[in-house]
Image: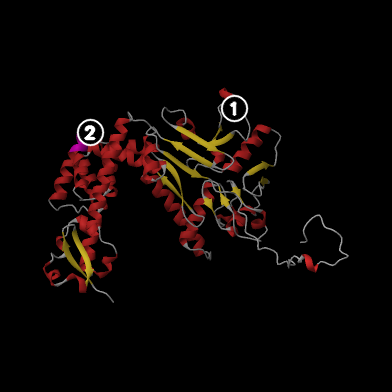
């Protein structure tokens, strides 16, 4: 096996095969003294380094990420200022950062706070002390403080971190230290901050993997604690009575049943589907497990889709699709055509073309505007969430959508263009060519004399 050794060069540190490096490699500085840029240039050579060097590499990676987060923070805050605080800054940033609009909004909000209210924390990020995740904990704690109090907490916390009293690598410790300082600098505002935080209570649905999702409830601590105590009590009672589900499964099933107004004695699989589930007929008939998709979530396994569809509370609707492209063409009609048109678009588009909001909860949008002779039809209609419906009318923004191909294009005020394409409802499976023997054409000399003339060559 070839051994690589470090060798100095005018361009930095190189790794060469042992036989090519020469005797000078013994005088090279050890890895501990390499610059961060030299560490970042390492590739396959990492496999030649020992455990101590790998720990140093991890430290370099952490510091570089922290500095990159600081750069992103300043860039987002500056863009926010250049756009005069437009609500669509996050939309523009999300496209370049390759994150969802929701994630980008959180980053923009955090960046503005760090630049305007927590300059010491931002400076610590630029120094490589801690990354954006740790900084976000300080942002959360100081969110309801006045500007003066927030900056005082920022300065005191920075002194504690630099003095070694608080570990910058421990986000939980940072948050607790910031919380104690917030109570010290503004003890009278503690109750007011708690009341303000309770006004921000909310529920959030986050899609997960393997046909699962997480429901977050942001509640006052005593309400959440009491709710959990009741759920846990009921789960343990069922478990003690012989239920074979685990406590975690029981707590989840009981919570779902309570929210849906059902008896908490059975598994949550008894819940009827309240979403759009797209499933090819061969998957519904157990001939295949491909092609099932849940609006607002994405592909799900065929057996799970059948479980949802076969529930007695689920409602089936027929959707006719183009056999070649898979685009929805028609849907079982109801009495009111306008409602059928909306349902066809919801079945065809499934989601807002620019985000993942289910189409059934989106606005009907004229692709060619009504005032420019655009017709009201499924051909000229598309699903857009309220956010992107308003965005299309913002100066500098342009949103184009081809309903036939499912191609959505968005152009930002800087002229950058981003494109995404909707997946099809059905996928044509390649079929093997039939095994048919094709006779070879006869040579003219072999054609019998009594054969009738042919207008076409023999097949």
Q: Which residue is mark 2?
A: 147
Q: How many labels sit on residues?
A: 2
The answer to whether residue 126 is magenta is: no
149 drawn magenta: yes
Q: Which residues are magenta?
A: 147-151
| Label 1 to label 2: alpha-carbon separation | 50 Å
Q: Locate the C terminus and report the quarter of the image it occupies.
A: bottom right
Tell which tag, 1 or 2, sits nearer the viewer. 1
Q: Residue at x 21, y 43 (%)?
A: 121
How busy is the neighbourhood of tag 1: few (under 14 within 10 Å), some, or many (20 plus)?
A: few
Q: Residue tagged by mark 1?
A: 374
Between 309 and 186, the residue placed more toward the observer is 309
Q: Position of residue 18 (x, y in %)?
A: 21, 73
Q: Looking at the image, tell me whether mark 1 or mark 2 is earlier in sequence order.
A: 2
Q: Within the image, what quadrant is residue 383 found in?
A: top right
Task: In the rendered view, tell whether residue 38 sits above or below residue 96.
Answer: below
């Amino acid at each position: 096996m070839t051994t690589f050794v470090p060798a100095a060069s005018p361009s930095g540190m190189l790794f060469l095969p042992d036989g090519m490096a020469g005797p000078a490699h013994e005088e090279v500085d050890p890895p501990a003294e390499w610059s961060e840029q030299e560490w970042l240039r390492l590739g396959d050579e990492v496999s030649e380094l020992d455990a101590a060097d790998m720990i140093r590499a991890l430290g370099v990676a952490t510091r570089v990420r922290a500095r990159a987060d600081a750069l992103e923070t300043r860039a987002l805050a500056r863009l926010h200022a250049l756009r005069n605080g437009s609500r669509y800054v996050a939309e523009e940033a999300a496209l370049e950062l390759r994150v969802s609009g929701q994630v980008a909004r959180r980053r923009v909000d955090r960046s503005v706070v760090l630049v305007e209210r927590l300059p010491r924390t931002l400076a610590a990020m630029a120094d490589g002390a801690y990354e954006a995740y740790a900084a976000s904990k300080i942002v959360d704690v100081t969110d309801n403080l006045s500007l003066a109090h927030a900056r005082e907490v920022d300065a005191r916390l920075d002194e504690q971190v630099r003095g070694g009293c608080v570990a910058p690598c421990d986000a939980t410790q940072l948050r607790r230290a910031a919380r104690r300082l917030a109570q010290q600098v503004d003890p009278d505002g503690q109750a007011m901050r708690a009341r303000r935080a309770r006004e921000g209570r909310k529920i959030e649905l986050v899609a997960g993997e393997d046909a699962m999702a997480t429901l977050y409830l942001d509640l006052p601590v005593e309400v959440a604690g009491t709710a959990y105590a009741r759920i846990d009590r009921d789960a343990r009672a069922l478990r003690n009575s012989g239920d074979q589900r685990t406590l975690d499964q029981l707590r989840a099933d009981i919570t779902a049943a309570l929210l849906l107004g059902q008896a908490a004695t059975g598994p949550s699989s008894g819940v009827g589907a309240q979403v759009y589930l797209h499933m090819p007929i061969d998957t519904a008939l157990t001939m295949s497990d491909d092609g099932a998709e849940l609006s607002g979530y994405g592909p799900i396994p065929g057996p799970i889709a059948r479980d949802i569809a076969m529930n007695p509370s689920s409602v089936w609707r027929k959707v006719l699709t183009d056999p070649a492209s898979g685009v929805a063409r028609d849907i079982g009609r109801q009495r009111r055509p306008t409602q059928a048109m909306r349902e066809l678009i919801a079945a065809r588009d499934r989601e807002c073309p620019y985000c993942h909001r289910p189409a059934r909860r989106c606005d009907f949008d004229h692709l060619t505007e009504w005032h420019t002779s655009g017709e009201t039809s499924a051909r000229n209609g598309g699903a857009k969430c309220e956010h992107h419906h308003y965005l299309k009318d913002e100066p500098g923004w342009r949103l184009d959508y081809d309903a036939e191909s499912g191609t959505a294009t968005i152009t930002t005020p800087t002229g950058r263009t981003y494109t995404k394409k909707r997946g099809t409802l059905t996928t044509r499976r390649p079929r093997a060519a039939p095994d048919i023997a094709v006779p070879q054409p006869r040579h003219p000399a072999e054609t019998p004399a009594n054969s009738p003339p042919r207008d076409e060559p023999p097949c």
